[in-house]
Image (cartoon, rainbow, N blue to C red):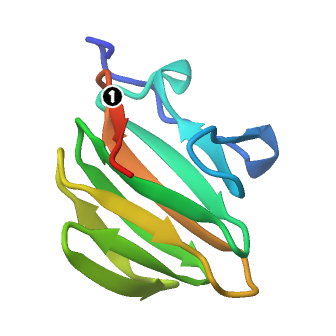
Amino acid sequence: MTDSAPEPRVRRAAEVTYESVELAEGLQKGVLLSDEQETPNFDMRRFVLEPGARVPRHTNEVEHEQFVVDGEYEVGIGDETYTVASGDSVLIPAGVEHWYCNDSDREGSFLCVVPQTVDHITVVE
C-alpha cells in the first residue's frame, strides 16, 4: 500500500490482460486496478466464468466484495447456494467456504474487490 494520496487515473479495457486461473478450468482473471496503478487500499479484478466452468469449494483469508457484470451462475457461500445475475452484489466474508458454477451457455463475469494484503487460498474439495 502507498502512504501518499494516489493520482486519479483511468485504466482502459484494452490495457487489461486476462490470464487463466489455475484453480479452475474455464476461469479467467484480469487485474483492473492494483499496486501497479498505485491504488492505496484495494485491488479490483474482473473474473470471467466460461460456460461449464466450475470453481471448487475454497476459502480465502480476505473478504471479497463482488458485483455480477454479465450472465447468470451459481455461487455457493457456506451452506447456501445462490443463483446470481447481472446487477447482483455478493459479500464473501474472509474464511468462508465458497464456490462457483456456470451451467449456462453464456459467459458470466464479476468484479471482485479485495483488500491489498497477502491472501492464501485453501481448496476444500
Count of all numbered marks drawn on residues in the image: 1
84 vs 54, nearest the viewer: 54
Q: Is residue 45 visible?
A: yes
Question: Can you say whether 33 is above or below 1 in the image?
Answer: below
- Residue 84 in picture, x, y percent from top left: 43, 84
- Residue 45 in picture, x, y percent from top left: 52, 46
Q: In the displayed image of the protein, which residue is found farthest to the front?
A: 125
Question: Can you say whether 91 is above or below 73 in the image?
Answer: above
Q: What kind of residue is marked 1?
A: His
> Element under label 1?
loop
Left/right placement of residue 2 relative to residue 22 reads left
Q: Is residue 10 visible?
A: no
Q: Residue at x 73, y 39 (%)?
A: 19
Asked where in the image residue 120 lies, by quadrant, the reply is: top left
- Residue 118 in picture, x, y percent from top left: 32, 21
Asked where in the image residue 88 lies, by quadrant, the reply is: bottom left
Question: Can you say whether 72 is above or below 121 in the image?
Answer: below
Left/right placement of residue 13 relative to residue 1 reads right
Position of the N terminus, as image quadrant, is top left
Label 1 crowd (10 A; few <14 / some 14-19 / many >=20): few
Q: Residue at x 40, y 24 (%)?
A: 6
Left/right placement of residue 22 relative to residue 112 reads right
Where is mark 1, residue-wise? Answer: 120
Q: Residue at x 23, y 79 (%)?
A: 80
Q: Residue at x 30, y 52 (%)?
A: 64
- Residue 21 in picture, x, y percent from top left: 63, 41
